[in-house]
Image (cartoon, rainbow, N blue to C red):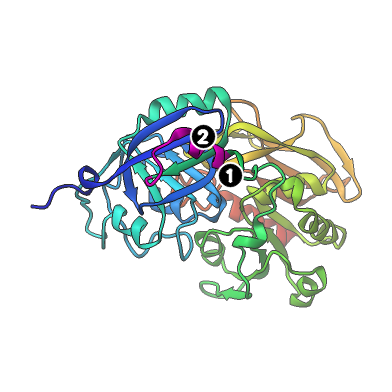
């Protein structure tokens, strides 16, 4: 039997922008990469995490100690490629064990040129990010000098002010056909959409037209949609002015709206709220959220580093109706959802800050797709 790859791999170095350095061994491609250091608490679903476009330009730290157990298959990817800038784990599985596995995680990272790192004290790294906040980071298996790598880290752009949705969006529209008889036509604006999202809509009889992030309102109107959906995606919502203006046109035309994650932040901006960067974000598949409209608590899948600045319980008058907070995170009271109603209390649009498509993650929030269907029926 050959020796485990991580024992043969060269040393690797991770340096945060505040100068803190961590050491380990190369995992995946040998090389150098930069991004924003973030951690995710999911104990499973690493393939879905790595292929989520929302992680573009981020170096992801897995808090679960053992990663790669189930290898890599050809079915669970949430897009056609790995989007993370880098991947940091404690113990990389030496031999995957799953009947669906086609190759190991290390092989897939190398094949896609993703620089990773294993044998790292990820508990210490996570605690440092929690205390100091998300920050720029460099990861290298070719550089041995922490000071030299730090200089290159400091030359990298910040996530604040970054407009990234156009870089991960589809360039050509495509259609996901409904299962059974079509009920409604939905335009889904791809800001970094996960492939399972239109599938969840198609399961409910929706014909989903996935379109580029740069689409015009005229082109959306030409599709004659029953509803419009804004997806998850990377970057700072404060930099997405074009998409905010597009959403305001949609709301002014009284088209039913549903958004998730980045789509929630843009909904907030379109309604007149501000956004802000969280200290270390919400990332994982075990976040408790209360739906204030039903008072039910659901365990949800998160991936966001920004949030909407709004106060639960306050009703905000907008040109499109009355906006208010519909969901909050029970860990820290961060806004996790918004809703827009007309003066008579009828729902016109809503959004959540998490992932109801549950890939990977719990299925507590799948009812939100049914709520979208109900919204279009009511319209």
The residue range painted magenta reads: 141-153
| Residues packed near mark 1 inside 10 Å, few (<14), some (14 to 19) or many (20 plus) | many
Q: Could you give the CA–CA distance between mark 2 and mark 1, rounded to whole angstroms?
A: 9 Å
Answer with mark 2 or mark 1, whichever residue precedes in sequence.
2
| Residues packed near mark 2 inside 10 Å, few (<14), some (14 to 19) or many (20 plus) | some
The percent coordinates of residue 27 (x first, y second) are 32, 47
The percent coordinates of residue 10 (x first, y second) are 28, 45
- Res 216 → quadrant: bottom right
Would you name the residue on which mark 2 appears?
Answer: 287
- Res 291 → quadrant: top right
The answer to whether the residue labelled 2 contacts the one labelled 1, judged by CB atoms less than 8 Å apart, is yes
Q: Is residue 143 magenta?
A: yes
The percent coordinates of residue 67 (x first, y second) are 31, 43
Prevailing secondary structure of the magenta residues: helix
Would you name the residue on which mark 1 appears?
Answer: 354
Horizontal arrangement in the rendering, residue 253 relative to residue 26 (left or right): right
The foreground one among 13 and 233 is 13
The foreground one among 140 and 81 is 140
Horizontal arrangement in the rendering, residue 83 relative to residue 227 (left or right): left
């Amino acid at each position: 039997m050959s020796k485990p790859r991580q024992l043969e791999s060269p040393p690797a170095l991770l340096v945060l922008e505040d100068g803190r350095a961590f050491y380990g061994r190369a995992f995946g491609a040998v090389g150098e990469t930069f991004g924003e250091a973030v951690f995710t608490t999911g104990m499973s679903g690493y393939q879905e995490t790595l292929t989520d476009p929302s992680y573009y330009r981020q170096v992801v730290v897995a808090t679960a100690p053992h990663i790669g157990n189930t290898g890599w298959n050809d079915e669970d990817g949430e897009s056609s490629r790995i989007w993370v800038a880098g991947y940091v784990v404690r113990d990389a599985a030496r031999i995957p064990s799953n009947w669906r596995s086609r190759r190991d995680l290390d092989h897939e990272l190398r094949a896609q040129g993703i620089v990773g790192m294993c044998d790292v004290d990820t508990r210490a790294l996570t605690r440092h990010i929690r205390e100091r906040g998300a920050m720029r980071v460099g990861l290298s298996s070719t550089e041995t000098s922490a000071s030299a790598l730090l200089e290159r880290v400091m030359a990298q752009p910040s996530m604040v002010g970054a407009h990234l949705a156009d870089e991960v969006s589809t360039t050509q529209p495509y259609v996901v056909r409904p299962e059974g008889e079509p009920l409604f036509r939905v335009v889904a604006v791809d800001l970094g959409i996960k492939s399972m999202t239109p599938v969840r809509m198609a399961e409910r009889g929706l014909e989903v037209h996935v379109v580029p992030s740069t689409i015009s309102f005229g082109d959306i109107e030409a599709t004659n949609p029953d509803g419009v959906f804004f997806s998850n995606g990377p970057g700072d919502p404060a930099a997405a002015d074009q998409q905010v203006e597009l959403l305001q046109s949609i709301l002014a035309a009284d088209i039913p709206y549903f958004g998730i994650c980045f789509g929630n932040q843009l909904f907030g901006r379109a309604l007149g709220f501000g956004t802000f960067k969280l200290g270390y974000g919400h990332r994982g598949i075990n976040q408790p959220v209360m739906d204030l409209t039903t008072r039910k608590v659901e365990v949800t899948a998160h991936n966001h580093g920004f949030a909407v600045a709004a106060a639960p319980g306050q009703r905000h008058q907008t040109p499109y109706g009355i906006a208010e907070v519909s969901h909050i995170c029970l860990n820290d009271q961060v806004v996790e959802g918004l809703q827009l109603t007309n003066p008579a209390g009828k729902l016109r649009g809503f959004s959540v800050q998490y992932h109801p498509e549950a890939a990977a993650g719990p299925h507590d929030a799948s009812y939100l797709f049914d709520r979208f269907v109900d919204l279009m029926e009511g319209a």
